[in-house]
Image (cartoon, grey):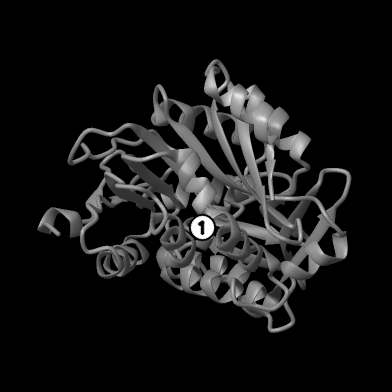
Amino acid sequence: MSVQAYEVRDDDRRPPTADLLEVVQRGLRLHPKRLPSWLFYDERGSQLFEEICEQPEYYLTRAEIDLLDVHASDIAEVLGEDVRLIEYGSGNAIKTRMLLEQLRAPVCYTPVEISPEPLRQSVQRFGELFPGLAIQPLCADFTKPLRLPVPPRATRRNVLYFPGSTIGNFEAREAIELLRKMRAEAGEGGGLLIGVDLKKDPATIEAAYNDKAGVTAAFTLNMLARINRELGSNFDLDGFRHRAHYNPMAGRIETHIVSLRKQQVKVGKMFVDFDVDEAMQVEYSCKYSQADFAALAAHAGLQVRHVWLDPQGLFSVQYLTRADVAGHWSMRMAANGMVGG
C-alpha cells in the first residue's frame, strides 16, 4: 500500500474548533436547552461508544453483525464490482470488514470520520486487514459537503455506506437533507447502503440506552467533561444524570442530561442557570418501520431497492438509489421480492 493510503486527509472546510463555544452557548440559550450529539465524540467518547456496543442490552451491533453474517454476500452481489466504498462515521472495523471481504475488486475504501485519532486507528486496522486495498481516509464532518479524494482507478459505482443506526440520530427534516446530500455525493448510478433500526418492543429499545453497567450514562455525561476540558467550563458531572426514554408517538429514544439540583455553570463569559430536574436534550435515536423509512427516502428523491433483515428482525440494512433509476432494479424486485431474509 502506498504512503498516500495511510495519510489522514483533513477537509479544510470543517468548522474551526473555536466555533465550539458559539455552538454550546447557542444551545444553552434555547428553551429547552439542547446540545448537538456530535459533541459526544471526542477521543474518550468514541472509546465509550465502542464499549456501549459490547453491552448485553445493546442489541443493535449484534443484530447488524448477524445480518451481515447471513447477507453480506448478497449485499456485495447487489453492489457489484469496482465499487468505491465511502463510509460515514467509520468506527469499529467488524461490520465494514465483513462487507469488504465480500466485495469483488473494490476500487478503494474512504472512511470519513470527524475525530482524527479514531480515524487513524481505523486506517491502521484496515491497512493490516486489506493490504492490497487503496485506503483514502478523510477527516471531516460528514454532514457537511465533502471533497472526496480522487480514486486510484475508474469506479463503476460510488456506494455511501452508513452502518449502525446513525441515520436515526437526525430528525426527519435533517435526515432528508442528509440523504439528499448523500444522493448527490453518490452521483449518477451510485447508491446508499444504510443501517436502519426497526421499531420493536419499547422495553427492548429502552434497555439498549440504559445499560446496567452505566456505560451509556458515562458516554452521555462525557459531553460535559469535553466542554469543561475544551472551553474551561465548570460543569459538575455529579450534579447531572443521564436519562433515555422511548417516545412511542414520535418513534424515538430521547436522551437528556438532567440537572439534579439548582445550579449555575460558567461557559465562556456566559453564566447558565439550571433548575432542579431541568432536562437538556442531547440526542434522538429514531426507530422506523420499513414503510416509515421508505417514505423518508422518497422525500429525498431516493427509492429503497432492497432490504436485508437480521434473523430476529430487529435491524435492517437498506440499499437506496435515485428514484428515477429503473430498468433491471424493478425486474429484480419483481422476481425476488423487496425484502431479503
Residue at 74% x, 65% y: name it: 258
Residue at 79% x, 70% y: name it: 207
Q: Is residue 292 left or right of residue 143?
A: right
Q: Is residue 141 left or right of residue 172?
A: left
Position of the N terminus by quadrant:
bottom left
Residue at 53% x, 23% y: name it: 328
Farthest-out residue, bottom:
213
Report if residue 200 is visible in the image.
yes
The residue closer to the viewer here, 204 or 68, is: 68
Crowdedness of circle 1 by 10 Å Cα count: few (<14), some, many (20+)?
Answer: some
The residue closer to the viewer here, 232 or 98, is: 98
Is 212 drawn above or below residue 90 in the view shown?
below
Q: Quadrant of residue 13?
A: top left
Is 199 drawn above or below residue 222 in the view shown?
above
Q: Is residue 188 left or right of residue 152?
A: right
Is 216 drawn above or below residue 334 in the view shown?
below
* Rendered location of residue 259, percent (x, y): 74, 68
Farthest-out residue, front:
335
The residue closer to the viewer here, 92 or 77, is: 77
Q: How many marks?
A: 1
- Say which amino acid is labelled 1: Leu
* Rendered location of residue 157, percent (x, y): 37, 33
Report if residue 262 is visible in the image.
no
* Rendered location of residue 167, percent (x, y): 60, 45
* Callout 1: SS: helix
Q: Which residue is mark 1?
A: 39
* Rendered location of residue 75, percent (x, y): 52, 47
Is 61 drawn above or below residue 179 in the view shown?
below
